[in-house]
Amino acid sequence: MRLARISIAARHDAAARIDAAALVDATWAAVRSADAVEHVVARAVPGGFEVGVFLQPADTSAGRDTARALMGRVLINSPAMRQWRIVADTDVPLDSLRPRG
């Protein structure tokens, strides 16, 4: 399993009219079965949100690309999110977070 983190920010003067729970709901509404999404979390940060998408694919680029495409669908399809943009993405293999030893 992988964690893809997507950071989004409002375009210039777009007011934040969405909260983390609504963003998670909008994300789930955009999920396709082929995305292999297991869990979605979001938290507000200064200037925007960080969205964590836990995915089943083990491949680094596939997980990040899937999460980025998913968030792109959210930003296009959700009227409340149309003035937002993706500003960063990262991918973390959950195995790398396990303690060694």
Image (cartoon, helix red, strand yellow):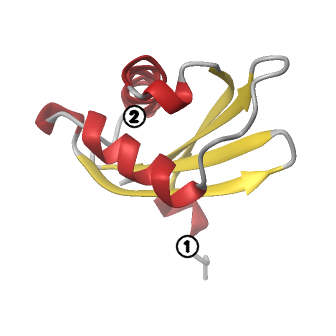
In the rendered structure, the answer to whether residue 17 lies left or right of residue 21 reads right
- Relative to residue 75, is residue 30 depicted above or below? below
Q: Is residue 2 visible?
A: no
Where residue 78 appears, x then y in whole percent?
41, 28
> How many numbered circles does the render carry?
2
Q: Which residue is mark 1?
A: 98
* Mark carried by residue 32: none
* Residue lying at 15% horizontally and 32% vertically, measured from the top left: 34
The residue identified by callout 2 is 63
Q: Residues within 10 Å of mark 1 (few under 14, many from 20)?
A: few
Residue type (three-letter) at the residue carrying disc 1: Arg
Q: Is residue 78 left or right of residue 36?
A: right
- In the picture, the quarter occupied by the C terminus is bottom right
Q: Secondary structure at mark 2?
A: helix
Q: Amino acid at mark 2?
A: Gly
Residue 8 appearing in the image? yes
- List x then y, in percent, for residue 71: 46, 29
